[in-house]
Structure formats: C-alpha cells, structure tokens
Image (spheres, helix red, strand yellow):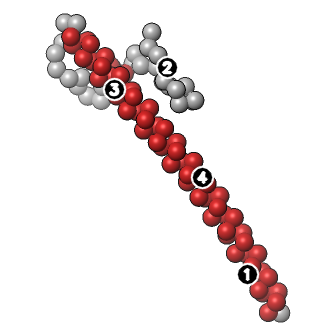
Amino acid sequence: MERAENERLRRMAQGKCLENLLIMQENEWMRRKAQQLDQENKALLAELKQRQQQHQGAGGPSGSVSGSGSAAVTNLKPAKATGKQQQPK
C-alpha cells in the first residue's frame, strides 16, 4: 500500500518537474521577445525623433508633437516579424 502511494507521489513530482521546465522555457522565450520588442521600440522612437528634427529643420512648425504622437507615427512602417527594421523610402 505504501509502495503504491510512493509511486503515485513520484509520478506527480515528475509531472510537476516537467511542467516547471515548460514554464521556464516559455518564460525565457517571453523575456527574449520582450527584449526584441524593446529594441524595436527604441529604434522607432529614434527614427521618429530624427524625422521630427528634419521636419522642424525644414521650416516646419516648431515645438514638439502634442498628444501621443500618433500623427507623426503614421508614416512609419512596422518592422517585419524577423526583428529587422524596414528602411524608409
């Protein structure tokens, strides 16, 4: 009787170990994806600031973009899923 209980507990522990491993792997994948998205976000922000400076330098309105900046972002194309930035045309 005790042997069967020990075997049941061993299988349960084994299952939990596998579950933990899968969670850790998913966590690592999500951490990498978050880093990639952070890098893309920083690149897009830098591009937006550069375009904003070029626009202001070309006799455009002075001052910063008001609100969330969505009007200035409309000309930006989203990056491909590979993580590479598309070059502006």
How many neighbours does mark 2 have within 10 angstroms: few (below 14), some (14-19), or many (20 or more)?
Answer: few
* Three-letter amino acid code at the position of disc 3: Ala
Of labels 2 and 1, earlier in sequence is: 1
Determine the CA span between mark 2 and mark 4. Answer: 28 Å
SS type, badge 4: helix
Of labels 2 and 4, earlier in sequence is: 4
Of labels 2 and 3, earlier in sequence is: 3
Of labels 3 and 4, earlier in sequence is: 4
* Three-letter amino acid code at the position of disc 2: Gln
Residue 23, above or below 66: below
Residue 23, above or below 5: above
Of labels 1 and 3, earlier in sequence is: 1
Determine the CA span between mark 2 and mark 3. Answer: 14 Å
Determine the CA span between mark 3 and mark 4. Answer: 30 Å
Residue at the disc numbered 2: 86
* Three-letter amino acid code at the position of disc 1: Leu
Residue at the disc numbered 1: 9
Left or right of 42: which side holds 78? right
Residue at the disc numbered 4: 26
SS type, badge 2: loop
Of labels 4 and 1, earlier in sequence is: 1
Residue at the disc numbered 3: 46
SS type, badge 3: helix
Residue at the image point whose x is 67% and y is 69% from the top: 16
SS type, badge 1: helix
